[in-house]
Image (spheres, rainbow, N blue to C red):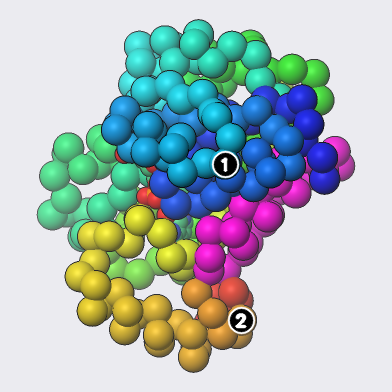
Amino acid sequence: MDLKDKHIVIAGGSTGIGFEIARQAQLKGAKVTLLGRSAEKLANAEKRLSSPATYVQCDIGDTESAKNGFEQVGEFDYFVSTAADLTYAPLAEMDTGAIDRMLAGKFWGPINLVKYGLKNIKPGGSVVLFSGLAADRPAPGTSMVSALNAGVEGLVKALAVELAPIRFNSISPGVVDTEGWAFMPEEDRKAFFASLETSLPARKVGAPADLADATLFALQNPYLTGETIHVNGGGSLM
Ligand SMILES: NC(=O)c1ccc[n+]([C@@H]2O[C@H](COP(=O)([O-])OP(=O)(O)OC[C@H]3O[C@@H](n4cnc5c(N)ncnc54)[C@H](OP(=O)(O)O)[C@@H]3O)[C@@H](O)[C@H]2O)c1
């Protein structure tokens, strides 16, 4: 798949899956723009990429910041959002700051994209938003995460119809080894990943490259819209 002359914008592209999407897109010839809240993380990410990239400091969940960010981005072909700042805790005990940060990435971000960003999408363009396995397999402490991921999956179906012919799809990862797990003490994380390597049908924890591959497919396949692709090692079967 050749991405030469295509401009791909990745909200959340400074770390994890978003960074790997940026890396793979560049290798296929794309021009890449990264969006994120931390200028330092964006600058570090740009240094780690093999070719120069543009980056724009922007909270996609904040109206003014998103408006300003999309102005700076200009025209683009493809938009991906992996943006997420998640807290795992019982909903009744969760403070509103944590809830707001979760809503910013996964709820307000896509809304701001539609309201302020899509006027700059080129003909033939498409969008991929990130959901997650918790939408289908909730556990205690995942109520917000489950609800937001299910919301993303519902939103891509509705937007695929409302804003056709722009294509909207979502990717639902299972557990993927990224900076997103940094909240877990290293020993616990290692034990958790090791248990998945023996129990998951795919016998592995997800790598960012597994998700980047699926994302580039969803962005470019002209007959795919309104779908969620589950890339979870068989996690939804357990
Ligand atoms: N990793 C997994 O196991 C897993 C499992 C299921 C689903 N997922 C989903 O897959 C996606 C990517 O996960 P990941 O592990 O790669 O995440 P990650 O490494 O934690 O990266 C998240 C990125 O989002 C950015 N971000 C957060 N809030 C933002 C906002 N309001 N505006 C702009 N940027 C924002 C962060 O940068 P700043 O802090 O600089 O803003 C960061 O670069 C997420 O949607 C996640 O829910 C991941």
> Which residue is tagged 2?
202
- The quarter of the displayed image where residue 224 is located: top right
- As drawn, the residue found furthest toward the bottom would be 198
Instruction: Assign the N terminus to one quadrant of the image.
Output: top right
- Vertical placement of residue 169 versus 57, above or below: below
- Helix or strand or loop: what does disc 2 sit on? loop
Residue 36 screen position, x and y as percent: 39, 31
Task: Report whether 220 appears left or right of 154.
Answer: right
> Which residue is tagged 1?
50
Residue at the spot x=13%, y=44% of the render?
Answer: 95
- The quarter of the displayed image where residue 128 is located: top right
Give the Cα separation between the discs numbered 1 and 2.
30 Å
Magenta range? 206-232
Amino acid bearing label 1: Ser
Q: Counting residues from the N terminus, which is met first, the one under dot 1 or under dot 2?
A: 1
Residue at the spot x=60%, y=76% of the render?
Answer: 234
Residue 99 screen position, x and y as percent: 24, 41
- Is residue 84 a member of the stretch shown in magenta? no
The image shows a total of numbered marks equal to 2
Residue 225 in view of the camera: no
